[in-house]
Image (cartoon, rainbow, N blue to C red):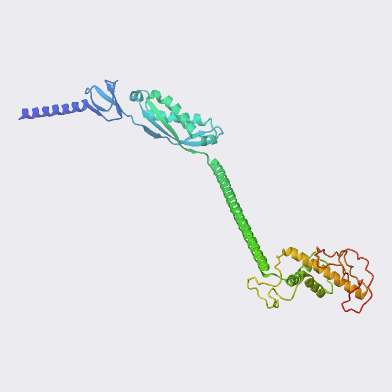
Amino acid sequence: MSGVSAGLIVLLLLVVFAVVVIVRTIRIVPQQTSQIVERLGRYSRTLDGGIHFLVPFVDKVRANIDLREQVVSFPPQPVITSDNLVVNIDTVIYYAVNDAKAAVYEIANFIQGIEQLTVTTLRNVIGSLDLEQTLTSRDQINAQLRGVLDEATGKWGIRVSRVELKAIDPPHSVQDSMEKQMRAERDRRAAILTAEGVKQSAILAAEGEKQSQILRAEGSAQARILEAQGQARAIQQVFDAIHRGKPTQRLLAYQYLQVLPQIARGDANKMWIVPSELTDALKGIGNALGGTDQGPTGRDEDEWVDTGERVPTAFEETALEDPARALAEARGEAARSSAEAEGHRKGVTGGTHGFPADPPGVPSAGDPSAAPEAPVAPEPPAVSQPPVAPEPPAPPTDQPGGEQHP
């Protein structure tokens, strides 16, 4: 029994030894990982990802190196700028091991070496810049740090892919000044934007006012044009109606007398001389023009109503004259009749009594050679002219009309 037990123990030991040998012989390396193998204390080889076999108790794995990109962040480092200001800078470095043997045998701790090299390079770069350049030149600082670190860590089998300045903290006094400056800058920009907005608003308001004034002016012009056209049509219709109604000289004289007060009220008319024999003058106008008291139908003019039809009369049909010409002729007839009446009055009273003599070219009432039917262009009485010497008075007669005989 003792022999069997001893054999089992030996067999068990052999199995355990075989398992240990197998475990130490077979080595499985993960992807993106390298292992440094030493044989009897010396570098033997570098194992990459996959299965490998080692000589048990002879080969030994010295280090396991991760070949993926690593990120390391260092604590804030105080750095002095060229204008003697101390700033605290946080840096972040991205690196990767591309030579596992150099990373193991060229430097004892490459992480610590990268940290110290970063601090030294950072102080060298920031020392040549002032605070404003340090705050505004991060890309330039990152590029300089990356170039220096990549060149220095190349012999360690390490490649620095990127360096970032995570934070740049100036002193508190400088921070307060910077905050005030930034606040003033923001206020200035806000004022500029507000002024630009007010400017654009004023421009738009002016453009709108301009367009509205243009539209109002166009509307006013159109309204005046339409009003003038309406007045022209109304005048034309009145003129046509007057022509169709065949106005008599009495009507024209009556309308002339209605207009005289309006003329007298004008600012340019300072003094008017109206003869006392105005009734005789009007009768003279009617007699001179051949006017009657009857309308075109032979009835009384007050009873005549215009029916719009042409009524035959015993008189020859005459063409209507221009209203302006008819008015001028009426004024001329009124002037001549006034002159005749004035001549009659002077013959009766034997003096002028302050009235001017008959104007030259106007025949007297007793002159048989005068032709009252001939129209003469009227002339307004000149008040400012000096009076002409009066004619010698005629001897009184027994005739009631006060006519003078040659």
Q: Nearer the viewer, residue 121 or 329?
A: 329
Task: Tell me residue 13's x, y (percent).
Answer: 14, 28
- Give the total number of marks visible in the rendering: 0
Say which quarter of the image contains residue 130.
top right
Which residue is painted at 55% across and 42% down in the image? Answer: 178
Task: Tell me residue 266's x, y (percent).
Answer: 78, 66
On the picture, is 201 further left or further right than 383? left
State the quadrant of the N terminus.
top left
On the picture, is 24 further left or further right than 269? left
Which residue is painted at 48% across and 31% down in the image? Answer: 122
State the quadrant of the C terminus.
bottom right
Q: Nearer the viewer, residue 203 or 70?
A: 203
163 to 366, vertically: above or below? above
Q: Nearer the viewer, residue 123 or 284?
A: 284
171 to 42, vertically: above or below? below
Which residue is painted at 33% across and 23% down in the image? Answer: 101
On the picture, is 375 further left or further right than 195? right
Task: Tell me residue 287's x, y (percent).
Answer: 79, 72
Q: Residue furthest left?
A: 1
Task: Tell me residue 131's x, y (percent).
Answer: 54, 35
73 to 262, vertically: above or below? above
Say which quarter of the image contains residue 25.
top left
